[in-house]
Image (tube, helix red, strand yellow):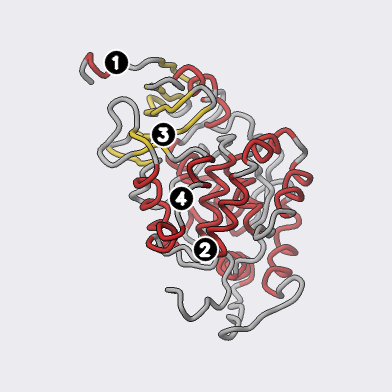
Amino acid sequence: MSSTHSPDAEVRHVSDRPLSLGDTLGLLARGPYDPVQRRLDGTVWRTALLPSGPVTTALVADGPRSAVVRAWGPGAEEAIHRVPTLLGELDDATTFTPPAPVREAHHQHPGLRIPRTDEVAQAFVGAILDQRVTSIEAFGAWGRLVRRFGTPAPGPAPDGMRVAPAAADWARIPTWEWQQAGVDPGRARTVTSAMARAASLERLGSLPAAEAQERLTSLPGVGRWTASEVACRAWGDADVVPVGDFHVAYGVVHAFTGEHVPRPGPGVRTTGLAPADAQMLELLEPSRPHRFRVLRLLALSGRGERPRRGPRAAPPTHLRH
């Protein structure tokens, strides 16, 4: 890089165990064209809006257990301070005994960690946009809104990268902008309402995992699936399970048993725990406190549905699906 792009802060992070940037940070990207995180030529580029200001980071592996991290922008020093948690150093897998369906994947991906971003507002908005739509629609809405209302990425970030809007800016997005992004009024209201209390949401990370998720689900429009999506990304929860997503449950049941779970008929509504979710939870129970780790390994092996799609429901007829 040229001198004009000299980083504002830099560190070489060395771990005492294998580290894979792709496997670890891949969880955080919302599609291949995410304006907030992108992987190009072996470098993982990320932007963030930290309390100290916006930042762009570039992470490059320089060994099986190490990475060089460079940062640009007002939030550079804070971002460097957060590198260990971002790279999953708080994720303790020493007690993990992989069940048979992921044993090979566990061997092939020794550098997998569950990262912790502490970026609750960003994880929350992404999860809400994922609700009830396909991944392509969710990624498209996220990209459009971040490019429209985010701010320029500091430093030499790749073209098209942006810093996601601040909570107050998410709350001020006009109704028609949500509509043009393909986001229905219900999800838009959920984001707007939650972002008005973003400071309280950010503080949830200091609570025990179960209590933090319970408080999240007390918000209108937020269920167990949404809370789990926030927990695995913002708080690095290696045990959370995204209940309410047929595709995830289907992938787990099929990987463990070879059975094909019948797909619910159009417009079918259920009360309580769906049979597929119940079976998934039973199969994953012996893997506590590493159930989400099992899901990540299934995703990396291609044997399970990637836990990224929102809980499915029959959409209103005026919305795309």
Q: Earlier in the sequence, mark 2 or mark 3?
A: 3
On screen, residue 106 versus residue 11, left or right, reads right
Q: Are marks 4 and 1 in contact (CB under 8 Å)?
A: no
Query: Is residue 175 depicted above or below 68 in this figure?
Result: below
User: Residue at label 2?
Assistant: 305
User: Residue at label 3?
Assistant: 47
In front: mark 2 or mark 3?
3
Relative image position of residue 76 (x, y in whole percent): 44, 20
Relative image position of residue 67 (x, y in whole percent): 43, 25
- Measuring 38% from the left and 24% from the top, which residue is drawn there? 62
Amino acid type, label 1: Ser
Q: Earlier in the sequence, mark 3 or mark 1?
A: 1
Distance from disc 3 to disc 1, alpha carbons, whole Å, reads: 17 Å
Q: Are marks 3 and 1 in contact (CB under 8 Å)?
A: no
User: Residue at label 4?
Assistant: 173
Q: Earlier in the sequence, mark 2 or mark 4?
A: 4
Q: Where, by quadrant of the figure, is residue 247 drawn?
A: bottom right
Q: Earlier in the sequence, mark 1 or mark 2?
A: 1
Query: Is residue 194 depicted above or below 245 in this figure?
Result: above
Query: Is residue 98 depicted above or below 313 in this figure?
Result: above
Element type at mark 1: loop
- Measuring 42% from the left and 73% from the top, which residue is drawn there? 320
| Crowd tier of the residue under label 1, counting other residues whose Cα lies within 10 Å: few below 14, some 14–19, many 20 or above | some
On screen, residue 316 versus residue 164, left or right, reads right
Q: Are marks 4 and 3 in contact (CB under 8 Å)?
A: no
Element type at mark 3: strand
- Measuring 41% from the left and 34% from the top, which residue is drawn there? 47
> Which quadrant would the C terminus be assigned to in this image?
bottom left
In front: mark 2 or mark 4?
4
